[in-house]
Amino acid sequence: MAVIVQKYGGSSVADTEKVMGVARRVVATARQGNQVVVVVSAQGNTTDELIKQAKAISKNPPKREMDMLLATGEQVSIALLAMAIDALGQPVISLTGPQGGIMTDTQHTKARIRMVDGDRIKRELEQGQVVIVAGFQGRTQNGDITTLGRGGSDTTAVAVAAALDADLCEIYTDVDGVYSADPRLVPEARKLAEVDYGEMLELASLGAMILQPRAVEVAAIYGVTLHVRSSFYMDEGTKVKEVDSVEREITVTGVAADENCAKITLAGIPSDVNTLYHIFSALAQAGVNVDMIVQAAASKSTTHLSFTVTREDLAETLSTIERLQADEEWEVLADDNVAKVSIVGAGMMTNPGVAAKMFEALNEADVPVFVVSTSEIKVSCLVPRAFCAEAVRACHRKFELDTAK
Ligand code: ASP
Ligand code: MG
């Protein structure tokens, strides 16, 4: 008997009708003779609404209480889905994250799963029940409720699949798979049959928010193959798995855009490593995640430093720098009208000239480039936000991503 984990996102259970639709799909899977574990997110915009309610009461609510609040969203969906499945005559039980054995560390609002104690889930499965587990939540060793960060239900599903050694982990969502680019920007974008974990991780962290990046990491560690597909259609979606990059004929798999970035330039700072150390350790202490960094000499002893952060972190970044430069004469420039466009592909590792081709595409499209960064499987260019869509289209065209390979 196969063990199948199915995860349904918030848009897939947004209203009663959709909950019934999910229930029918789950029951059909169970009646084919499978043991089914279902992980669900909170309905629709519930989590956003709960966050809004909290912020209306306090600017800085205690994180433990935030988790107490946010975990209620998923508790509503597991109960409603269990009722819908029961109404179809299928034995079913819902479990909260803590009841499902999801054990986490103590970092409230962005906890990490430490381990999944699958005993309870297994026991319920053996009794012929469909088991519904609340996504996004778990508990600490002390019994406190935690949540896993936005999009965390994906990670719950993958961790449960790993713990049960499941045969299949399906991620049902409101898109029908992973595309070579955002179809809203590039109408001729293609659905990818499979992507490598590394590629998916880059695409996930670059704004194609189909999967929580942590979920992809956990899947890669435990070798869980994910199938990302639509909850509204039966079509095959995209498999996320290990793909042998040597066998890859294509160098670039997808183009991603991230509009959530801001660029800071510090002009005329001393060009020594110590200054860099001071700036970036202060930012790290302030909890600011720095992404791209470039440094260019301005004179013998001074340098221009540019780096990017998320737009939410811009204010914190500027105040940190202000504190640092108390009596220095740095010129600080901030620009949040930028976007990061990236080409991603595991095949890049073994093929030269990929960055050159990207620059050629951007040049032909008259897109200015401020900062470039690369990794083994991606090249990212920071461009003016107004040029973002054109840049994505130009790269998509240049690498011929619209033609099936
Ligand atoms: N409900 C949570 C969120 O909106 C978790 C999830 O959807 O995966 O982020
Ligand atoms: Mg999600």
Image (cartoon, rainbow, N blue to C red):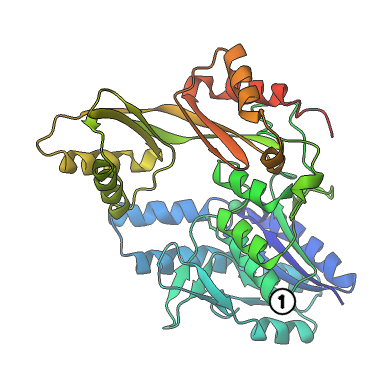
47 lies left or right of 344: left
Residue under circle 1? 164
Quadrant housing the N terminus: bottom right
Q: Residues within 10 Å of mark 1 (few under 14, many from 20)?
A: some
Residue 49: x and y, percent? 45, 52
33 lies left or right of 278: right
Q: Secondary structure at mark 1?
A: helix
In the depicted view, which residue is nearer to us: 330 or 139? 330
**Quarter location, residue 331:** top left
Number of residue marks: 1
Residue 142: x and y, percent? 41, 83
Identify which residue is drawn at 75% across, 81% down: 125
Identify which residue is drawn at 51% across, 73% down: 138
Quadrant housing the C terminus: top right
**Quarter location, residue 186:** top right
Residue 365: x and y, percent? 60, 13
Residue closest to the far front: 300
